[in-house]
Amino acid sequence: MTKRAPTEASANKLVTYLLEKGLGGVPPLSSAENLATEYLIDQGYETHDERVDSLINWETTKNFTTGFITGLGGIITLPVGVPSALAASWLIQARMAGAIARIYGHDLVEDRVRTMILLSLAGDVAKKAMADLGIDLGGKLPNRAIRQVPGRALVEVNKRIGLQLLTKAGGRSIAQFPKLIPVVGGVVGGAFDAVVCRMVGRTAKSLFRSPAGGIIEGEVVASDATQRRE
């Protein structure tokens, strides 16, 4: 049977779901805000960079476990049909990216921040989504270039990212790993998800981290060692 190509409607549903559930939390996961707070109140870290690195390491481990469990098959309730392993991974990664943004002082309600979270999640396919809109990001996802995207274009950017994610989901072979050896399929799926999760974390860190003297939400950023959440 021929697979139907992703539609704009399904793309909008996907990004809305990922932002609402990924940032707001879905049991047993807390919200991105609460996750960030756990690290911000921990005085064992000297800098926000240390907090973010620790967060990425922990969420990567969690993503491996989630990938292992859901890689055994089954579909979770979603507004669009996506394999459960991939859906669970995306939710964890969106939550992690949101927590990273919050640790670095960004407002998770702000539309541009939410688009940057999706860009973190999409990785290389985000470049294709932006290119489709005539926005050339070069070889990376630079913070400055993304911030120059007009506010009115953010909805379209989100939709294009959703389309690329759905296309990517349709081509992922892990979800169709032979059911005769589900445990092996789970291990491979979990390892793949963990690698991708770490990449998402690093991308989010590069997008949301501002150097000393940089600007976050209209304010000059102090050095990382002294930067604290208000």
Image: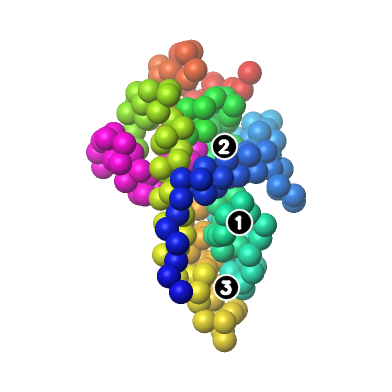
Q: Is residue 158 magenta?
A: no
Residue nearer the viewer, 108 or 167: 167
Of the numbered discs 1 and 3, the one sitting upstream in the chain is 1
Crowd around label 3: few <14 · some 14–19 · many ≥20 (10 Å): many
Disc number placed over residue 98 in the picture, else none: 2
Residue topped by disc 1: 88
Residue topped by disc 3: 186
Q: Which image quadrant for residue 210? A: top left
Tell me the residue at 33%/39% (across/down): 130
Q: Is residue 184 above or below residue 52?
A: below
Q: Which image quadrant for residue 143? A: top left
Tell me the residue at 52%/27% (across/down): 111
Q: Are marks 1 and 3 in contact (CB under 8 Å)?
A: no
Q: Quadrant of the C terminus?
A: top right
**Kind of residue indicated by mark 1:** Ala
Left or right: where 220 falls relative to 84: left
Tell me the residue at 42%/58% (across/down): 5
Left or right: where 224 falls relative to 85: left
Give the structural element (helix, strand or loop) at label 3. helix
**Kind of residue indicated by mark 2:** Gly
Residue nearer the viewer, 228 or 190: 190
What span is colored magenta in the figure?
Answer: 116-139
State which mark lies toward you, 1 or 3: 1
Task: Name the outermost residue toward the bottom.
Answer: 180
